[in-house]
Image: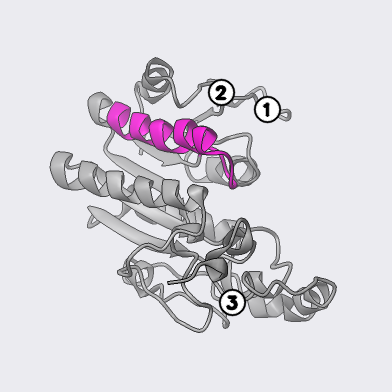
């Protein structure tokens, strides 16, 4: 990749990647709707509202590969999710296609499959079961990515990211933790592997308690270095301080599943 674009530069994951990715890709254009507070003088940054196609076309101009993290990163009102994550993601893929971008790495989420129970191990071929409007938007992103790959030849990798952080901070995150350096490795595979056409990977490190079969990423050479079990004692101590969540504790999506949940009130 001669030059890559990374959206969502001001978010938590984007901020972490701003410290790690330049060692791999020295020519990066960063973008977000707001300017990062700690933006360095040597960083190229172009602000853009992803719901505005003209602004998206501006940031993809001259780009070879895209890491699309941008959007609303938690559950929110439908209109917010629609504009940021659905219209915005469509605009990104369409602008990338028009500009001749070769590859897109799309930051999907575990919340696209959040309503699978924790006692079920799943691979990438399962039917999506979103746990929120946010999860629906990520399922949409995977679907439109597949369309642009199959119809237009754009090479697309979707990462169903678990939780990116320095360490897993509770019991759920022992299963879904993603070390930032392992995320960089997944991004490199998506941007560089010669055999990528359209693929879905789980964004998770080497976690003994994992709910996800990530063999699809492994067959492309993914070798995660992070091990959630190294932090088990601290994570379980933190978990002991949390109250029970009868719905969230059952499903992989956690609190995203229990928020607004009322399925048990319905009768046949």
Separation of residues labelled 3 and 1 (CA atoms): 41 Å
Separation of residues labelled 2 and 3 (CA atoms): 42 Å
Kindly give the residue lying farthest to the left in the view shown: 151
Label pair 3/1, CB-CB below 8 angstroms? no
Residue displayed at 43% across by 50% down: 136
Label pair 2/3, CB-CB below 8 angstroms? no
Q: How many marks?
A: 3
Residue displayed at 37% across by 45% down: 141
Would you call the spot at circle 1 few (<14 residues within 10 Å), some (14-19), or many (20 or more)?
A: some
Would you call the spot at circle 3 few (<14 residues within 10 Å), some (14-19), or many (20 or more)?
A: some
Occupied quadrant, residue 199: bottom left
* Residue 265 visible (yes or no): yes
Query: Which image quarter is the C terminus in?
Result: bottom left
Residue at numbered disc 3:
250
Residue 218: in magenta span: no
* Residue 51 to residue 186: above or below: above
Q: Nearer the viewer, mark 3 or mark 1?
A: 3
Taking depth in this image into account, of 257 and 261 the one nearest to the observer is 261
Would you call the spot at circle 2 few (<14 residues within 10 Å), some (14-19), or many (20 or more)?
A: many
Left or right of 236, for residue 20: left
* Residue 5 to residue 104: above or below: above
Separation of residues labelled 1 and 2 (CA atoms): 8 Å
Please name the predominant secondary structure of the magenta segment in the image. helix
Residue displayed at 70% across by 78% down: 230
The colour scheme of the drawn protein is: one colour
Label pair 1/2, CB-CB below 8 angstroms? yes
Q: Which mark is residue 39?
A: 1
Residue at numbered disc 2:
45
Chain part drawn in magenta: 70-96
Taking depth in this image into account, of 195 and 198 the one nearest to the observer is 198
């Amino acid at each position: 990749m001669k030059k890559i674009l990374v959206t969502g530069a001001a978010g938590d994951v984007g901020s972490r990647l701003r410290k790690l990715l330049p060692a791999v890709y020295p020519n990066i254009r960063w973008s977000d709707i707001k300017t990062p507070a700690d933006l360095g003088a040597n960083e190229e940054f172009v602000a853009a509202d992803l719901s505005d196609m003209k602004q998206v076309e501006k940031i993809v101009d001259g780009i070879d590969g895209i890491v699309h993290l941008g959007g609303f990163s938690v559950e929110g009102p439908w209109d917010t999710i629609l504009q940021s994550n659905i219209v915005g993601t469509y605009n990104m893929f369409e602008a990338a296609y028009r500009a001749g971008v070769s590859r897109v790495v799309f930051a999907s989420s575990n919340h696209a499959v959040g309503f699978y129970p924790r006692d079920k191990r799943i691979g990438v071929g399962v039917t999506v079961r979103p746990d929120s409007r946010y999860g629906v938007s990520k399922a949409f992103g995977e679907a439109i990515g597949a369309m642009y790959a199959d119809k237009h030849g754009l090479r697309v990798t979707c990462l169903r990211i678990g939780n990116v952080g320095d360490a897993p901070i509770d019991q759920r995150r022992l299963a879904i933790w993603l070390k930032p350096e392992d995320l960089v490795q997944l991004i490199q595979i998506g941007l560089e592997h010669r055999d990528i056409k359209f693929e879905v990977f789980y964004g998770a490190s080497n976690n003994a308690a994992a709910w996800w079969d990530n063999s699809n990423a492994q067959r492309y050479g993914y070798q995660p270095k992070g091990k959630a079990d190294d932090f088990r004692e601290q994570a379980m101590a933190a978990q002991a301080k949390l109250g029970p969540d009868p719905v969230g504790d059952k499903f992989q999506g956690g609190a995203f599943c229990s928020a607004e949940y009322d399925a048990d009130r319905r009768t046949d």
